[in-house]
Image (spheres, rainbow, N blue to C red):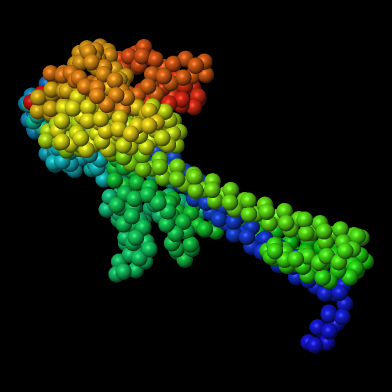
Amino acid sequence: MNKILQYISSSLSRRLRLFIALLATSVFLVALAVMFMQSREAVRSEALEHATQQLSNTVQRIDNILERVEVATNDTKWLVNRHPDCPDSMFVYSKSILENNPDLHGCSIAFEPYYFKEYGRYFSAFAYWNNGKVEVSREGSPSYEYFYMDWYQLSKLLNKPAWTEPFIDSDSEEDVSGDMIFSYCQPIWDNQGNYIGTIATDLALEWLSETISAVKPYPNSYSVMIGRGGTFLVHPDPSKLIYESIFTDCLEGKNPEKMALGQAMVHGEEGVKQLKINNELCYIFYKPLEKTGWSVAIVCPENDIFKGFNRLRNTVIGIFVIGLLLMLYVLAKLIQRELKPLNTLTDQAESIAAGNFDEELPNDGRTDEVGRLCQSFGNMQQSLVRYIEEMKSTTAAKAAIENEIKVASDIQMSMVPRIFPPFPNRHDIDLFASMTPAKEVGGDLYDFFVENEKLYFCIGDVSGKGIPASLFMAVTRNLFRIIAQQEYSPQEIATKINHALSADNDQGMFVTMFIGKVDLQTGRMEICNCGHNPPVICEPGGVPHFLQIKNTNIPLGTCDDFVFQGEVLENTWNTQLLLYTDGLTEAENLRYDLFGEDRLLKAMEKAPGMDSQDVVVMLQEAVEAHRAGVAPNDDLTILCLKLVKDKN
């Protein structure tokens, strides 16, 4: 060993060749390791995204079909309610729903015993496919009492529409057809609210199985679907269908990972899990079908996901080994021919390469290539140190600013109500609001709350944009919430907010605001407009128009001594009130045309009959269509309110 070390140390050329060989090998190995790790993670991320997207597309497609079934069934229920005493019409309705929806397996419009006395105890208008044509028949007999079937009883007992678990389709006259189906059941009530029957629209489980099984992100991947209790509804192994569940292999505490997966799927969660199936590591992507309570999963073996990566890795390693050997051979020849005594410079340069930028380079006053090389190394070292320090400072400052703006935006958005419907236990308030800042933070605001059967609400627009406007907005919103909770009238609230904002307002900022208070017992609404855009109002049976306000007042924060005046709307039951900021009417397109009040009123002509959320979404889409891709020039805030009065 000593002889080997002496042999190496006796020659600078040998030492330099050994050093370069080790350094190059280390760099290449580290580079390859980093590249392989990053590539593997990139492949994994892409695989997760690819499989998740395919699963989401499949679930979306199924949800669209189920939504279409629900819409068709609900439309048919409307026809049945119009002609509840015409039994012959039920055959027409059940046949029509199949003709308009060829994906459906069948449809039954079934009624309570003796509802149609002329037909006796049984009457169910059943439509089904027969050799490509829709046939109809009347179901019900002592051997098939349909009103005891799950599909009939489920909606009756729940008193609401529901999807059934899959069941074997049975016929009233024959024994069993053998088809697995599942049904959407819609209860039927008469004008007095009495239950009179059920509309059951059937889909074949085989169709759903084909749709799900067609999803194969990778050659050996496959799909499964489980019911609300974990039973397999779709599985590549037909013997597991219906008779086994995802928990079958988890009895007696075995396979806890699979148990956790099954529980997550049964609970309607969405995600990705990694576990072994048949001693093979797999990724399982799962997502629920919200309408039925079932869950769909795609199983992708890890070997399939990384097959291409593994092949590329082996190829790159082979190329690396050959290239490294060739490079070492060439370097050895060049060093042997060109190397000169540069021990000191080599050692110092190696130290700098390791990250020691404050290392001093030799300076022996030489003017040849070695001297110029030392001088160049010194200049490069100083420039690199300065550049790294500047980069650190710039990066840190930029990251701090971006983080502060993000936090400010999150805080601002958290200050306004964002959960809708805001009062789920109340059916007399139909309210929805949306706020979209033009920048990271904005100056618009809205708020609402219920206090002692009084609904307080407001919308506002602060002068200016950006962080100053957002701070002024936060102060204004907090003042409204604090003052309004003391149950003042809108004009009193405005007066007190104005007094608070006018004090020490050196920047001269102000806010336009519309404040309202509604008595939820009488429908009486008090309002105060503080220089804000006039709201759009639509009375029952009327045409949308701008609310005529006698006292527009002035914006808040401009004059401390101003006395605000309010107005009263005596009866606002079933009246739609739309509040907005000028980001709606002043939205511009490429030609700088404003959205304007005329377009707003034209769009609001569609509002009667729509709920508040649909109205807000409709207006947002209208503004986006008008902008045609142009970035917003102002914050956009919309609030739609309707007091719903129960006819009973």
Residue 112 position within the rendered picture, expressed as x and y whole percent measured from the top left:
10, 33
Residue 572 position within the rendered picture, expressed as x and y whole percent measured from the top left:
16, 20
Choose top left, top right, bottom left or bottom right for residue 149. top left
Residue 117 position within the rendered picture, expressed as x and y whole percent measured from the top left:
6, 26
Residue 543 position within the rendered picture, expressed as x and y whole percent measured from the top left:
25, 11
Report how many numbered discs are placed on residues in the image: 0
Left or right? Give the position of 333 relative to 155.
right
Left or right? Give the position of 538 relative to 194.
right
Left or right? Give the position of 524 relative to 320.
left
| Image height of 196 relative to 353, above or below | above
Q: Return the residue nearer the eye: 318 or 436.
A: 436
Which residue is at 39% across, 31% downward? Answer: 507
Q: Quadrant of the N terminus?
A: bottom right
Is residue 233 visible in this depiction of the protein?
A: no
Which residue is at 72% across, 63% downward? Answer: 353
Q: Quadrant of the C terminus?
A: top left
| Image height of 621 relative to 318, above or below | above
Which residue is at 23% across, 15% downward? Answer: 551
Choose top left, top right, bottom left or bottom right for residue 361. bottom right
Choose top left, top right, bottom left or bottom right for residue 513. top left
| Image height of 390 relative to 153, above or below | below
Is residue 555 visible in this depiction of the protein?
A: yes
Q: Return the residue nearer the eye: 402 or 417.
A: 402
| Image height of 389 relative to 280, above or below | above
Which residue is at 20% across, 35% downward? Answer: 483
